[in-house]
Amino acid sequence: MTRTAAPAPTGTDDPALDVEGLCVDLSTPLGTVRAVDGVSFSVRRGRTLALLGESGCGKSMTALSVVGLLDPAARVTGGAVRVRGSDTLRLSPAERRKLAGPVLSIVFQDALTALNPVQPVGRQIGEAFRIHRGLSRREAREKAIELMTRVGIPEPRERARSYPHQFSGGMRQRLLIAMAVALDPDVLIADEPTTALDVTVQAQIMRLLRDIQNERDMALVLITHDLAVVAQRADDVVIMYAGTVVEKGPVRDVFSAPRHPYTQGLLDSVPEHAVRGRPLPAVPGSPPELSAVPPGCAFQDRCPLVRERCVRERPVLRPAGEGRTTACHFAEELTHA
Amino acid sequence: MPDIRAASAASEASAASAASAATAEAAARPLLEVSGVTKSFGSGRRRLTALDGVDIRLGRGETLGLVGESGCGKSTLARVLLGLERPDAGTVRFDGTDPFALRGKELLAWRRRVQMVFQDPFASLNARMSAAELIGEPWRTHRDVVPTPKAREKRVRELLALVGLRDSDAHRYPGEFSGGQRQRIGIARALALDPDLIVCDEPVSALDLSVQAQVLNVLSELRERLGVAYVFISHDLSVVRYIADRVTVMYLGKVIEHGDTEEVFDRPQHPYTSALMSAAPVLDASRTTADREIQLQGEIPSPFDIPSGCRFRTRCPHAENLCTTEPPPLATRGTTAASGTHTALCHFPLGVAGESAGM
Ligand SMILES: Nc1ncnc2c1ncn2[C@@H]1O[C@H](COP(=O)(O)OP(=O)(O)OP(=O)(O)O)[C@@H](O)[C@H]1O
Ligand SMILES: Nc1ncnc2c1ncn2[C@@H]1O[C@H](COP(=O)(O)OP(=O)(O)OP(=O)(O)O)[C@@H](O)[C@H]1O
Ligand code: SF4
Ligand code: SF4
Ligand SMILES: [Mg+2]
Ligand SMILES: [Mg+2]
């Protein structure tokens, strides 16, 4: 990929975002459970990291911890999130607000609830410019219209006055993207940014993100279930399962030869390879309950390779080839068809 | 695998005979017939046409894939099918009757037969109700489906299992679930009444591939065994290709192509369909879409101000003068009984597969 080869104009190899050993605890009626357990990854400027994993494995919670917007039931109990040299987990709320937007920005997974239902969308998009850049209401409005044009909303001047419910699902998602990139952040975390978009609009949004990335040298963390988008857009991939990272590495290598049975199962479920009228292959079973993660490997109940050691000893991330890590005792036995 | 329907007494044999009877009936009368449905929002100059003379047909146990550009009117059409939005013009016939004319008991009976999985799993679930309450809510109105509290409890557990959730999830609230888990609660809820038709608006968009496969398998099984029909709205073309018997492509409020899934995917006739197919990202990282994608030029036209002639002409790579002056006719290809007709709204339909559209 050409993007990868491009020199980092900042002249530094320091990651734009460095997450280390992140732990998030949730208080539930049944007691405290660990939803995110020692997650680490980092992204350099201009690069894209994809976060993949089963529904409910803790991706959104990881993203929300990074930007400090976790729900009150959840609490970060360990780890560090470094951005521009400081650990955001240790900043005061006021200091953190200053980062949100110009430095660190997020596209939320839930497009409708993230927008204010009683305010015209143009005003909401323009708000960042008023707060962080001190623009007048009129100037902010012009900026908002410009951004709406960039994300492909027809007649943006007219539609800036509309309310969120007057837009289709995909349009709302694009409005959120417009808001998130408004201030040219160093790091953008996009949680399922294109799920509600048809492929032509998705391609347009992905090009827009790439352009911004190239112009501003932005680091992108892309949370998505769309493996094709990951294959096309990301440099590296992190695979999560039940709150932990189970595999990490360059996308190309991981997709062509996975080093964890969960990754393998995920790749095998691709409908592109399916035959109509025949059931799609799926990883059997479901992930363990957070309150009852077994000792040993969390994937043991569903793993085709499971054996005694997996029940006894919890696998930790270990090197598995050039720039790759896996959390499986028997990763070397996987042969990808 | 837990039972897929509430009336679990149904034997395989009776299900099979029901299915064959259903096929015979389907030939006689479609389950769903929508003609000339038009819907606009707003008024005067600021009137936005979301649906413009839409026709669709669906037989019992059939799956119709509905695809098209974001904002083209798919969810609006879904709401019309559910009776949640009254069309300005046109007719909807479900099993021969007009749902908008029904009242009282009949309306209730119809409501039971048609269910929806909403596009937005975050906004469509009442935050104050637990998963069990959400899934079981339809039984409060339709008491006979699962009559006793004990049976209801059991049924909730079965439905949760069908969509890959656990017993213990029954007592949790929407805010405590991830996006994909909420989406699955919406699916379980739609299954609760054993409907004849389920309108699925992006039902699997928030699911990882493995859970998606699990859910799609459940939907297929319901279709095989009970003859449930689906209108399946999705942006994921590989999912549509897998699940749908027929595909309807919409553009700016109009159906612009319709036909058998394989036909539409392998031999698209409309330039928009062909561009759509070409833009689908591929899994193979060594091949980028860039070399095969037909990038559409120009802005998405405004639904307030639809282009004259053909509404796709402002972005169509094949547009000619005629396209500006004349609305295109419905071009038809292939009318064998087996494959049905393959139609496209275009003056110059593509004869051969556009730019390696197939995958
Ligand atoms: N308030 C809460 N109380 C209890 N459990 C919660 C709460 N919020 C989230 N969870 C659980 O925490 C886990 C992680 O949720 P998260 O939203 O991070 O998942 P995700 O990986 O983003 O999934 P998806 O792909 O479906 O969006 C899930 O299993 C979810 O059920
Ligand atoms: N209540 C409303 N008031 C005004 N305009 C509306 C309303 N509901 C929908 N629209 C408009 O109607 C058009 C069609 O919207 P619809 O939600 O049906 O699109 P869609 O095909 O489902 O798109 P997506 O794929 O993005 O979900 C859009 O231009 C939308 O902005
Ligand atoms: S450690 Fe054992 S159970 Fe876990 S993924 Fe590897 S082989 Fe499977
Ligand atoms: S009618 Fe003309 S503009 Fe419209 S799709 Fe066909 S060729 Fe393109
Ligand atoms: Mg999520
Ligand atoms: Mg929609």
Image (cartoon, helix red, strand yellow):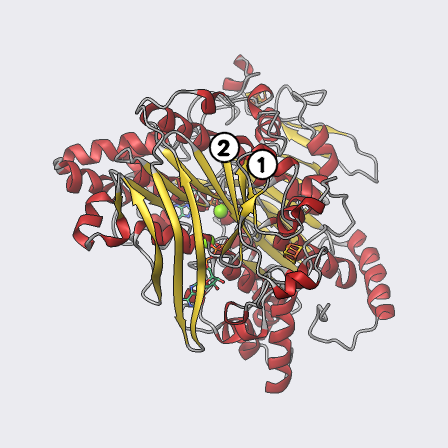
Q: Position of residue B44 (x, y in %)?
A: 33, 40
Viewer-closest of B315 and B37: B315
Q: Position of residue A37 (x, y in %)?
A: 45, 59
Q: Is residue A19 above or below residue A251?
A: below
Q: Which mark is residue A331?
A: none
| Quadrant in the picture for the C terminus of chain A | top right
Is residue B237 visible in this depiction of the protein?
yes
Q: Residue at x 62, y 55 (%)?
A: B211
Q: Disc 2 residue type? A: Asp
Is residue B89 visible in this depiction of the protein?
no
Q: Position of residue A9 (x, y in %)?
A: 32, 22
Instruction: First in sequence, mark 1 or 2: give its number.
Output: 1
Q: Is residue B55 above or below residue B293?
A: below
Is the CB–ligand 1 distance for label 2 below 8 Å? no
Chain of the residue under the numbered disc 2 shown in the image: A
Viewer-closest of A52 and B199: A52
Element on which disc 2 rests: loop
Q: Is residue A55 above or below residue B13?
A: above
Q: Quadrant of residue B112?
A: bottom right
Q: Residue at x 49, y 35 (%)?
A: A202
Q: Position of residue B250 (x, y in %)?
A: 56, 37
Look at mark 2 in the image and give the residue it sits on. Answer: A235
Q: CA distance from mark 1 to mark 2?
A: 13 Å
Look at mark 1 in the image and give the residue it sits on. Answer: A228
> Badge 1 local density, few (<14 within 10 Å), some, or many (20+)?
some
Element on which disc 1 rests: helix
Q: Disc 1 residue type? A: Ala
> Badge 2 local density, few (<14 within 10 Å), some, or many (20+)?
some
Is the CB–ligand 1 distance for label 1 below 8 Å? no
Q: Is residue B116 above or below residue B279?
A: below
Do callouts 1 and 2 mark residues in contact (Cβ within 8 Å)? Answer: no
